[in-house]
Amino acid sequence: MEIRIEAHVAHVAVSAADVLESYVRSGPVTLGLATGSTPVPTYRELIRRHREEGLSFARSRAFLLDEYVGLARSHPESYYSVIRSEFVSHVDLADTAVQSPAGQAADPEQEAARYEAAIRSAGGVDVQVLGIGSNGHIGFNEPGEHLDSRTHVGLLAEQTRTDNARFFESIDDVPRRCITQGLGTIREARHLLLIATGAAKADALAAALHGPVTSDCPASVLQLHDHVTVIADKAAASRLQRAGCGAA
Ligand code: GLP
């Protein structure tokens, strides 16, 4: 596992964009994209490179990690909409090349199985962007999730609903269910790129990287993967214990 600690969020974005750019320039690639606020500066940096440096996503395709159940695609907080407004609409990544679970599917369980199969039939994900929840979740795999789980319908933890209420008018508007790639699904991506910024992630990041591998901290499955890059700012890295990593 490579852990990069950067002084500022802007440097985190550049460092994460460097990893993604190397894949995008290498040929046809399948990206795993995350939503949430953490990757937004990275997406902005990739958009800048597209506009100013000719970085092209024309040969890329992408799968999202997760989606709220019950939100229409047109809802501004559906992850279908968010990934387009924050990233996809601003680069030459074809809209049809970006897949996500359908949160309004009549049968969400069936949709989860369809999505799992779609990722597999595409040959899997080359590099998966991940954020981390303040409770250690990745995707929407909440504490208690089986470490080998596949794409499934899940319940959002109350902590997650509270954390995500800032995107909605009130917490009552935050959906209770989601479709998320499972921890086993995420682990099949060939390279995991976890981005963490801000002091609110410090405990979760330390538990994920230094604590036991346990379903109590879903992000601890990173320890089971042989190709992981973690990029954190100093605040998120402040509880990491590794000597020489620059954590302040
Ligand atoms: C959200 C998403 C995750 C994301 C995490 C952290 O609920 N489902 O994919 O990584 O929680 O979000 P943020 O980056 O906004 O802190």
Image: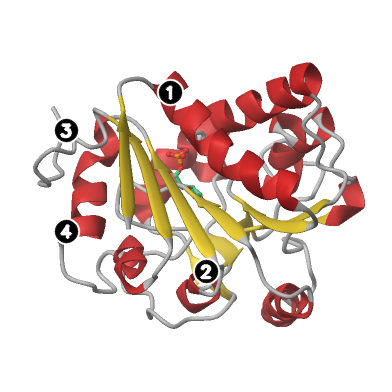
| Residue at 88% across, 46% down | 95
Q: With 4 as the anchor, is 66 left or right in this view?
A: right
Residue picked out by circle 4: 210
Query: Marks 2 and 3, Cα distance to the nearest angstrom?
Result: 27 Å
Residue picked out by circle 2: 186
Under circle 1, the secondary element is helix
Is label 2 in contact with label 4 (beta carbons under 8 Å)?
no
Is label 2 in contact with label 3 (beta carbons under 8 Å)?
no
Query: Marks 1 and 3, Cα distance to the nearest angstrom?
Result: 15 Å
Q: Which mark is residue 11?
A: 1
Image coords of residue 161 (percent x, y):
44, 48
Three-letter code for the amino acid on which mark 3 is drawn: Ala
Residue picked out by circle 3: 247
Q: Crowding near pointer 2: few (<14 within 10 Å), some, many (20+)?
A: many
Q: Give the mark nearest the N terminus, 4 or 3.
A: 4
Three-letter code for the amino acid on which mark 1 is drawn: His
The quadrant in which residue 75 appears is: top right
Say whether mark 4 is within 8 Å of ligand 1: no
Q: Give the mark nearest the N terminus, 2 or 1.
A: 1
Q: Give the mark nearest the N terminus, 1 or 3.
A: 1
Q: With 241 as the anchor, is 51 left or right in this view?
A: right
Q: Which mark is residue 45?
A: none
